Image (cartoon, coloured by chain):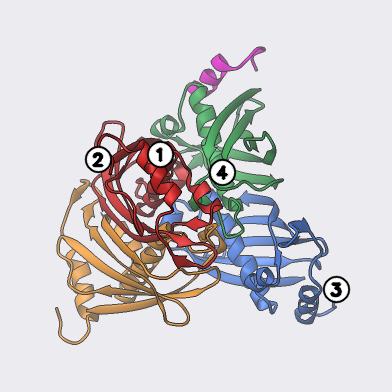
Chain colours: A green, B blue, C orange, D red
Amino acid sequence: MYISETSIRVRYSETDQMGYVYYGNYSAYYEVGRAEAMRQLGMTYRQMEEKGVMMPIASLHVKYIRPAYYDDLLTVRTIVKEFPKSRMHFFYEVYNEKEKLINQGETVLAFVDMKTGRPCSAPQWFVEALREKWPATKG
Amino acid sequence: MYISETSIRVRYSETDQMGYVYYGNYSAYYEVGRAEAMRQLGMTYRQMEEKGVMMPIASLHVKYIRPAYYDDLLTVRTIVKEFPKSRMHFFYEVYNEKEKLINQGETVLAFVDMKTGRPCSAPQWFVEALREKWPATKG
Amino acid sequence: MYISETSIRVRYSETDQMGYVYYGNYSAYYEVGRAEAMRQLGMTYRQMEEKGVMMPIASLHVKYIRPAYYDDLLTVRTIVKEFPKSRMHFFYEVYNEKEKLINQGETVLAFVDMKTGRPCSAPQWFVEALREKWPATKG
Amino acid sequence: MYISETSIRVRYSETDQMGYVYYGNYSAYYEVGRAEAMRQLGMTYRQMEEKGVMMPIASLHVKYIRPAYYDDLLTVRTIVKEFPKSRMHFFYEVYNEKEKLINQGETVLAFVDMKTGRPCSAPQWFVEALREKWPATKG
């Protein structure tokens, strides 16, 4: 299991007239969470695309628990529980400054060869990079 | 069961560098879908808030099947399967012009009294308005 | 001079906690305005890119006069005053249902050859399409 | 003159199919720039609204010079040239990691009393907070 944390300050543009962060904007927060998780694991999603593999989203689940507000400094905890094969699962928990859980979610991403447009496996170099940083018992 | 359809033209702002509609933007499409469903059922979400009840999102699920592209004219089919009590479920299907399914999703919305900030039941006037438009066997 | 009008219903996602449409979202409304203007003139921006020319934005000006609100049905009036050469100017006026002016703006777009990444002139086929639809005295 | 700098990492959600940051998203980057400028000056925009004054945008100008790309770490330099009276001017410059200028812009913000909905002057406490932090010759 690999856990990564990153901070996001809520922008005014992300609020709605309820005074809350619009429910659809957490998708972008989750995106930041997994991008930072990948960066900490030694490669970036930008590099993934530069090497010809893109990772479109196959599914998204969000359970909303509390609202977040303008200017809140949120913590996005991103969790990878298992090594990716043909797909990669990310789990997310968003906390506010009082360490209250705002919401939790999950995305499944596919690997797609950008030349052929066809699904492919997780690139070997990516799995190896993951393995090096993977904590304790290697997966 | 009540089914409503509305059209959405994909904006350039909604695409990402993959050339697809960004996965997080379907939340706003679903929002348009349920707003139009409510309008067709005889009341608007704006009226709901004017009458002191707001409907924050409790959960979101999306299963992505195909990408949508810039300038596609999408059809959002919004489905209400049962009468709301303390929560209201909406189901969504997004189709492109070739009638291919782009994705399908589901949201659960709560009813919240805007004065107290506490959850409440679906307002009586809303349930009655629904009942009038409800097709065939009344709920 | 060519004038085009299109309608946009304000989405909840586009409001902010002030209860207004967020000032940055008018850029997307203007984009819809010019896309519909081009469609009415006989070609789409999608076709422009398919033919290898893209039109990035060189400048944007907006003067905000009144707020727009959730669920407002806005009219975007898009005005092309002169034939494009190396750049194309669009002017915009956004009105609410009471025909009150919400804001007015202007964008300048460049033409860029997508193969070379270099600026180019307005494609001949585009200028000719414009000329056919151009009202009264041809430009 | 007061100059503030803040960093913004470009999100995937902010790119468009051109592979650039969508032109409308710089409005939100400018918003982050002025929010951080205000924070550094000793008060936050959140506090401003909590004290009953909001600052809607009166005008926006952007001159786009170079594109920004996914995962770029941008620097937003926000400049306040003079003390606010009935309106407040912010100037912005966005740079990429190679210190190349991406774009420059300007916004004018009004002060509005949230109770009455009427324009008002810059609050005295805000002007005084500004004065304390203001560099060199006081305004």
Q: Secondary structure at mark 2?
A: strand
Residue D101 tag number: 2
Which amino acid lies under the numbered mark 3 shown in the image of this protein? Gly
Q: Label 2 amino acid? A: Leu
Q: Respond whether the residues carrying marks 4 and 2 are from the same subunit.
A: no
Q: Same chain for marks 4 and 1?
A: no
Query: The C terminus of chain A appears in which quarter of the rendering?
Result: top right
**Which residue is identified by label 1?**
D41
Question: Magenta region: which residues?
Answer: A122-139
Q: Amino acid at mark 1?
A: Leu
Nearer-the-camera pick, C139 or D121:
D121
Crowd band around label 3 with a 10 angstrom C-alpha radius: few (<14), some (14–19), many (20+): few
Asked if marks 4 and 1 touch (Cβ < 8 Å), the reply is: no
Quarter holding the N terminus of chain A is: top right
- Determine whether A125 is above or below D53 in the image: above
Q: Could you say where residue C27 lies in the image, as x and y percent from the top left? A: 38, 60
Q: Which mark is residue D124?
A: none
Q: CA distance from mark 3 to mark 1?
A: 59 Å
Please state the chain letter of the residue tagged with numbered disc 2 in the rendered image: D
